């Protein structure tokens, strides 16, 4: 009985220490997890674009003019409803990005409701992870 009690105690203490560790037992730290998620999102976005998808920069024209991802199309979120039917194809994935989450979420909502296939890259910097 003592051996079983000792094993239970050792397992309980070990699990407590393990789960209390920053990344869990053998897990990633929050910084490592964020970097991994960034790389995965970037890889998926690149794949969509390589397969014919369109990089859609939904930032204001002034931000796009200062800096943007090569081959991206600028369509500020305020202009999407007016321009999407004439300028965007429905049979490709639109990879959208903006440095402001509320704008990319609004762009995603507008485009999905109109029947477009959308992948959210998020911030422009994610493309370069």
Image (cartoon, rainbow, N blue to C red):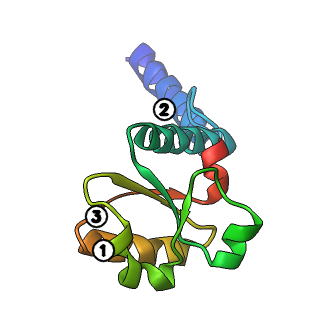
Q: Residue at x 41, y 42 (%)?
A: 48
SS type, badge 2:
helix
Give coordinates of residue 105: x percent, y percent.
45, 73
The quarter in which the N terminus is drawn is top left
Between marks 1 and 2, how big is the CA–CA gap? 60 Å
Q: Is residue 62 left or right of residue 58?
A: right
* Circle 2 crowding by C-alpha within 10 Å: few under 14, some 14–19, many from 20: few
Q: Residue at x 40, y 78 (%)?
A: 83
* Circle 3 crowding by C-alpha within 10 Å: few under 14, some 14–19, many from 20: some
Q: Are marks 3 and 2 in contact (CB under 8 Å)?
A: no
Which residue occupies the extreme right position in the image?
Answer: 66
Q: Which residue is mark 2?
A: 12
Q: Nearer the viewer, residue 31 or 90?
A: 90
Q: Residue at x 40, y 48 (%)?
A: 53
Q: Which residue is mark 1?
A: 85
Which residue occupies the extreme front position in the image?
Answer: 86
Earlier in the chain: of badge 3 and badge 2, it is 2
Between marks 1 and 3, how big is the CA–CA gap? 10 Å
Q: Is residue 41 left or right of residue 124?
A: left
């Amino acid at each position: 009985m003592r051996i079983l009690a000792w094993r239970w105690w050792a397992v309980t203490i070990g699990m407590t220490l393990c789960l209390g560790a920053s990344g869990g037992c053998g897990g990633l730290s929050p910084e490592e997890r964020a970097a991994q998620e960034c790389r995965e999102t970037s890889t998926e976005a690149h794949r969509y674009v390589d397969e014919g998808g369109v990089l859609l920069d939904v930032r204001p024209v002034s931000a796009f003019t200062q800096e943007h991802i090569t081959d991206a199309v600028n369509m500020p979120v305020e202009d999407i409803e007016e321009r999407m039917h004439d300028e965007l194809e429905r049979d490709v994935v639109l990879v959208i990005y903006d440095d402001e989450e509320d704008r990319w979420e609004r762009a995603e909502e507008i485009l999905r409701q109109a029947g477009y296939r959308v992948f959210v890259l998020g911030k422009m910097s994610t493309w370069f992870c």
